[in-house]
Image (cartoon, rainbow, N blue to C red):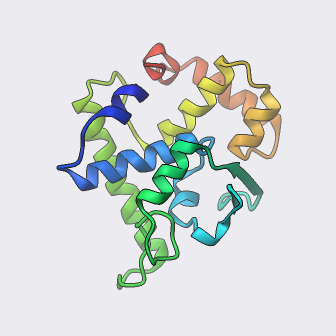
Amino acid sequence: MYKRQVSVDLSSEPLLDRARDLFMFSFYARGMPFVDIVFLKHDSIINGIIYYERNKTGQRMQVRVIPPLAALIEKYRSSYPYVLPYITSFSDRTSYMQYRYALGNVNRLLKRLGRRLHLPLVLTTYVARHSWATIAKEEGFSIASISEGLGHTSEATTQIYLCLLYTSDAADDSLRV
């Protein structure tokens, strides 16, 4: 899936391109949740490390900026404080409403991209998180490492999460290609 998703030319469809990039950002950033990505600011990236606080749990997180993640950060670099262009000061909507609107739009665009690529699953922002966890498990990462990457507050949560992944269609081999 990732080879097809990364390599498809979306230059003529900038909104679809940006949605794909957000998906890949999440995957490259160890399954960073959508809400944390859209509120991520440039000043949270220091010496090749992203420092952020999980919106859901308040847990402090660190993610190393690997080359494909660095490329996405540079692609969207602007004078705005946010890394990706989803929250702006020009909107009359609150930042929370911009986030909710962006989530719905990005998921609609990702579903369209998934259909275009003939993927056997519905592509959403959450699939990036699931995919990172699935591949990390298959690559032999410890439960503790996966739990840390996902920002779970306990390994028991991660065990349940991985169990659900391995018993659902979302964890089939289509995630690997």
Tally the marks.
0
Q: Residue at x 77, y 41 (%)?
A: 148
Percent position of residue 119, x then y: 32, 24
Q: Residue at x 54, y 30 (%)?
A: 131
Is 123 rendered above or below residue 55?
A: above
Is 87 rendered above or below residue 156?
A: below
Percent position of residue 33, x then y: 57, 50
Q: Nearer the viewer, residue 62 or 111?
A: 62
Furthest toward the top, the residue is 173
- Left-right relation of 153 to 21: right
Q: Quadrant of residue 8?
A: top left
Name the image quarter holding the N terminus.
top left
Q: Residue at x 50, y 42 (%)?
A: 126
- Left-right relation of 29 to 116: right
Furthest toward the left, the residue is 12
Is 140 rendered above or below residue 129?
A: above
Is 6 rendered above or below residue 74?
A: above
Percent position of residue 35, x then y: 54, 59
Q: Quadrant of residue 159?
A: top right
- Left-right relation of 73 to 135: left
- Left-right relation of 116 to 50: left
Name the image quarter holding the C terminus.
top left
